[in-house]
Image (cartoon, coloured by chain):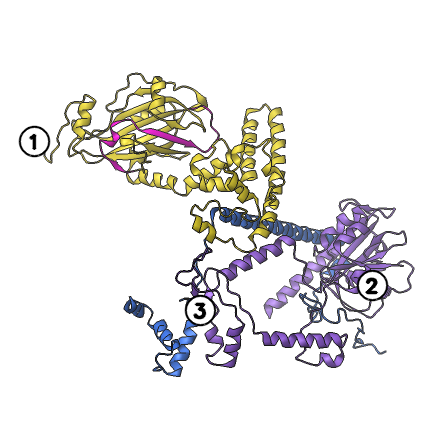
Amino acid sequence: MASVSKGIWSNFAKRSPSLAVKSKALQKALLSPSLPNGPVSLKQRSSKMRYTSPIGLDEIYPLAYQLLEKQSESIYKEVEQIEKQISESKDKEQLQQLHKQQEELLVQAELNNPEVIYNANYHTKSLDRTQPVYRHFLSEKWRSYSRMLTMQRLETLAVIPDSLPTLDPQVEVNLKFPHNNVERVIEPGTVLSSNVTQKPPSLEIVEFKESVDDKYTVLVVDLDTPDVENDSFKTTLQWGLKDVVLSNTDPIIDAKKLIQNPEWEFVEYLPPTPEKNTGKHRLAVWVFRQDDKQNLKAAPQGLERDSFDIRSFVAKNNLTPIGAHVWRSIWDRNTENVRSLYGLPKGRIFSRFRSGE
Amino acid sequence: MFKKQLFSQARSFATEVAASSSTSTTPITSVNAAIILSRTPIVTPEIPEFEQKYYQYQEELERRLMWTFPRWYYFKKGTVAEREFSKAQIYPIPKHRGVWFPKGVPDIKHGRDRRFKETIILPKKHQEEEATHASQASGAGDAQVSELEDVARPIKLNQRTTEADAKNDQTSLERQLSRTLYLLVKQNNGSWKFPSFQLKDNSTALHEVAEQGLRSIGGVNINTWTVSSTPAGVVKYGAKGEVVGPTSEGSTTEFLLKSHIIAGKFELQKNDNVKEHKWVSRDEIKELVNDEYFEQVGHLLAKV
Amino acid sequence: MFLHQQIRKPLLATFQQIRSKRTTAISPEVQKLVTQLSVLSAGRKQPRLLKLCNEDYVKHQIITKAWSQLRNQKKKSDEALLNKQLESMSFACEELKKISPELYNLANKKEYGKRFPLEMRVPTEYPPRNIWYYDYVPPVAKGSKK
């Protein structure tokens, strides 16, 4: 059966091949008026045989496809004009605006492409994040749930304003612990056992703008370390990373990369080991993007882990938070093992009454 | 009452101001009143292919999601009507033990497979009757007056295209029933435009001049309805009769008024200025008139 | 199980009993009511859920998008046309005012008793037998004698 596509959407001379569906059978199904080989996405043979497409779909679909494809063609022509302007222009501000326009148009040009929609809906994990349209789909999905959830957890657990005054999230931060080979993304606010958190987590920082070799700073702070002298709490820096280079194609910070780039880690990972009867400790992960891909100015050397003042650190280095995450830890039976593993002294046991009184 | 008086006073005051505000420098004989006389569509517009297929698709979806027809409500059990109705239906094959259904086990409730749309078939008897009627009618030739009085005659749909369409008779009002047709007349210089008439003095309103002028070229036996006495547009002409832009100063100014023809025979009268007329749609007007003229009047014409 | 159904849908259960010829212990009035209610209720009349496979779901989305885009374009062009007509009207009125205030006043005079003509037809799917009424003769004006 002939393909419904006659224009730009079947032309991959200028467009990225990641804008097509990888499987040939699926592509054929999406580019034919009806389903020539039956429903490919259904796995069971019986359900494949049982399936019938709605009547009339095969007649209207080619027309709808061609209508949207024609619109996309005209948008691509606009993009060409903008590209010409970009090659001629030298003003930095104008260039920035042109690039922004170009990206918006590229999203519009591919937003109604069935292959792109199919990938965005059903192949979420293998999306090519260098393509503006896929970043758009990812961003929409993130905004619809995860972003709101993260902000809600940060605010109800008072990470905002206990650590930093506020946050306008621009990136999605996914946190995983290499515990027991369980690859599960941690939902913000979860209480984790000391066994899970004993090795440094791997972080995925999903950018929704174009990003090539941007540098990031990551801080993990414990907000609930008891401060007996002042009858209060203090902040401990558990982990500090700086000048971490990430791109759209490579957004993950894991153990392997940290071994390759030891200079990233300016404060080594110390697992959260809450002392007994100090309640649940909030561990906030803050992610900052460094301006203009430059190294951190006031690069901290031998930073004091205890009584860490995150606000002054952020102010000194002129950082703006772009993403955050939070988990909680509590004393459990494994905490002492973790302490001995990292050569820490035995934890204190707090009681309702002070021993001095 | 008082309010009404006040209002009328305010109104007369406003008109007075308008009357005394400026003194005209243009002679009134350089003003023309033109009439855009339209025949509104007689049949509904043609539906584009995309819309047609979209409606078809939506209808199929709707039918698929419809509830089953409650036949027991419309046909009382045990009646002849019920028997005829259920005899006419084609029932789906019910599921049976030991039978393999490759397309899935039917899920039948009230004689309908709930996985698909329901098709209701009217009993054949009425159809047969209609068919015999139709054959009789066609045998007798065209519809006779006596036959038209027969209330039980079968429904026969008229054609959406007419003889005038086939002949492309552009002077006929029966052409292109689904489009709005406009009256165009041929000037002495050979160009086509809307009929326009010179004003003689200030005392007759624009729409009256236009209506009288229209009857002078098309005869008095027409029924027209002028939409408004205020002009809908203006076209300015230069000294040589060429169309100039709206902002420039023209030597002749033509005000356009909209009007509909409702009934009557438009017969071209013997006239010095007009020798030919046409009833044409917007697309045809675009080809007939010159581009500058169409630019000034195109937005006043309906797209259907 | 049967008991449970009876409790959930007592009305339908009685209705089913009647239809199965087993009992006749129901009055015609109640029977009528039951039939009428059965028309309004979804029970046993609802079709199965429409489940589309992924490809068809995407195709359906594309169709809906194309449709809404087309509607949008039509709406925008219609609005632009109306705006243009309004501008042209007001411009024409201003011109008329400049050229001749008397004519402007005449054009803006309120037309009392002006009504939309009843003879005008609404477009129908198929034309009438007589497409156009040719035998129109204008009524003789009240004052004049002919």
Chain letter, colour blue in render: C
- In the image, taking residue B207 as reference, residue B108 lies left or right, namely left
Find disc 2 in the rendering and name its residue.
Answer: B214
Residue that protrudes farthest toward the front in the picture:
B98
A357 in the magenta segment: no
**What residue is shown at x 23% (from left), y 23% (from top)?**
A306
Instruction: Kindly state the secondary structure of the residue where label 2 is placed.
Output: helix
Q: Quarter of the image containing the N terminus of chain A? A: top right
Distance from the alpha carbon under mark 2 to that under mark 3 = 66 Å
The front one of A39 and B239 is: A39
The image position of residue B253, as x and y in percent, is: 81, 52
Q: Residues within 10 Å of mark 2 (few under 14, many from 20)?
A: many
Work out how far the residue at label 3 is from the one at label 1, CA to CA, in angstroms. Answer: 84 Å
Quadrant assignment, res A175: top left
Which of the two residues, A106 or B107, is positioned nearer the viewer here?
A: B107
Residue A192: image x %, image y %?
Answer: 25, 35
The kind of residue tagged 3 is His
The residue segment tinted magenta is A189-214
Q: Which residue is mark 3?
A: B110
Quarter of the image holding residue A321?
top left
Q: Amino acid at mark 2?
A: Leu
Q: How many marks?
A: 3
Seen from the viewer's position, the closer of residues B188 and A263 is A263
Q: In the rendered structure, find residue A357 and report the number of the disc placed on it.
A: 1
Place of residue B121 in the rendered image (x, y in percent of width and height, measured from the top left):
55, 70
What colour do you see for chain A? yellow
If the image is split into quadrants, where does the C terminus of chain A sit? top left
In the figure, the purple chain has which letter? B
- Asked if residue A315 lies left or right of residue A24, the reply is left
Q: Mark 2 vs mark 1: same chain?
A: no
Chain letter of mark 1 equals A
Q: For the residues tagged 2 and 3, is the chain the same? A: yes
